[in-house]
Structure formats: structure tokens, C-alpha cells
Image (spheres, rainbow, N blue to C red):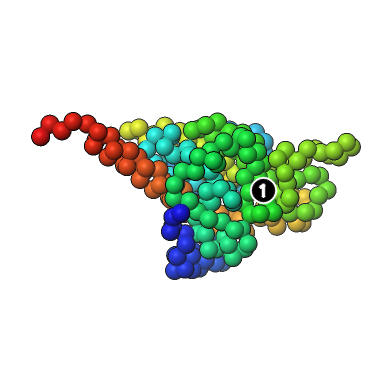
Amino acid sequence: MTTAGRGWLSNGVAGLRIVGHLLTGPLLRRRRMSWGATSSDVEASWPGGELIPDPAWTATHAVTVAAPAEQVWPWVAQLGQGRGGFYSFERLENLLGCQIRNADRVLPEHQDVAAAGEIRLAPQMAMRVARVQSAADLVLVVDSRPGDDSRPGDDAGPGDDAGPGEPAALVAGLWSLHLRPAPGGGTRLVERLSYPRQRSISQRIFSSRHLIEPISYVMSKEMLSNIRDLAQRREITSASDEDLAQPSLL
């Protein structure tokens, strides 16, 4: 387990940053909504985008990782409550009852995302795996049904198929991570958040840009930065092991 995201000081500072961003609202919004992203990242049509063709708002965050996608993907694949955590501010998440434990190693038992079918944000809140391509794309969605005023994702099981006569589930929110080659053999890790236009009051609150966007910025920035550091650490370790295995010329 990693100590990243566990210290009271770092979590306290993160909490203050969230409050600050909530209070300042639109003043820094443009920078927050495209943190680390290039104009190409922001304008790109990422896999899963077709699930919310006319979003109320989107945010795109990104980092460049000095490691190949195959080294980055295992950390992405094991995201989730009861899995590898979210590599973010663990104490803040657990104050809300999320029961998160961040991993600092690859967990082989949590690498098959497609078989899992869902990724839990908290014990009673899950996102459905809508699309997964190893070392490339992970698309997660929150489902809801027309006229359903419950919080999207509550007690949702994999697929959560509608019964006879019930309306089909709608996508109430989308979170996706994408890995693409970067110069020098590295990886561009891009996160996309997308929310549709909502009608019910409860879903408007759940997907409110004024509420969700500042919080997700602080948490996502920490998550992406820690995934980068973990993947690069593994790359450095692997390279060192390989060097030790080579015969010395001295």
C-alpha cells in the first residue's frame, strides 16, 4: 500500500483547495477543466463520447508518463473501491464512507476489468464498464432510468438490465481514461469527464458542474499524477533489473 493520499496534512490541504475552488467557481474553471490537456486532447472524440452526444459539460485532464502504455495500464485496470483505490486523497474519500485503500503495487487479481463488469466508487455506488481495450481505453458510465430520482449509480449492478416493460437505462455520467503513444516511448494518459443535460432536480445536483467540476479537478489531478509516478517507478525498476542482468564491460 502506498502512503500517497494518506497523510492528514496533504488531505487537509486538498480539502482546503476544494473549498477554495468551490468558492471561486468560474474564475479558474477554464484552467481546471483542461488541466494538463492540449487543445488536441480537449477537441478529440474519445471512445465512449458517443454515449453522451450532447453533453451539458465535459472536462479533460491529462499527464505524460515516461513509460509505455503496457506499464501504465495495470494501474488503470485496477482502479476502484475494493480494488486498487483511486491513487488520490484517501482520507477525504473515506470521510464520505468510500472505504478506499490505495495500492502501490500491481494487483494481478484485479486486472480483468471486463470480467469485473463494474468499478465501485464506494460500497453502494458503482459505474458500469461500458468499454475496455487493454492498454488503450477504459470507459465507465453511471446509469439511470427515465423518471428515476435516485442518485445515479446507487446499487447498480453490472449491466443493470431493465425488466419487462421498464425503460432502458440512460447514461447519467461518463468517466473514461485513454492511453495513447507519446514521443520517446512514453504514454499520454487522458481523462475525460462528461455529463448529459438533466431534467430531474436530484440528477442536476449530482451532475452539477459548479459542484462536481472543482472536486473532480483536485482529486483527478492527484490521481493522474500518482499513476504517472507509479508507472514510471516500475519502469525505472524494470530498466535497472535489466541493466543488472547485462554483462559488464568494465
What SS does tag 1 mark?
A: strand
Q: Quadrant of residue 55?
A: top right
Q: Quadrant of residue 206?
A: bottom right
**How many neighbours does mark 1 have within 10 angstroms: few (below 14), some (14-19), or many (20 or more)?**
many
Q: Residue at x 55, y 41 (%)?
A: 110
Q: Is residue 129 above or below residue 206?
A: above
**Is residue 55 something that shows in the picture?**
no
- Where does residue 178 sit, x and y in percent of width and height? 51, 37
Residue extending furthest right?
A: 165
At 44% from the left and 55% from the top, the residue drawn is 2
Which is nearer the eye, 15 or 122? 122
Seen in the picture, residue 6 relative to 45 is either above or below; the reply is below
Report if residue 226 is visible in the image: yes
Residue 36: percent from left, percent from top? 44, 47
Q: Looking at numbered disc 1 in the image, what kind of residue is underneath it?
A: Ala
Question: Front-most of 53 and 67?
Answer: 67
Q: Nearer the viewer, residue 52 or 93?
A: 93
Relative horizontal placement of residue 197, taking residue 177 as reference (left or right): right
Name the residue rendered at 79%, 53% in the picture.
149
- Residue at point 75% right, 41% down? 160
Q: Position of residue 223 (x, y in %)?
A: 48, 51
- The C terminus lies in which quarter of the figure? top left
Q: Is residue 16 above or below residue 205?
A: below
Residue position for label 1: 126
Q: Is residue 231 left or right of residue 18?
A: left
Please state the horizontal and vertical placement of residue 7, each as a whole percent of the image.
Answer: 45, 65
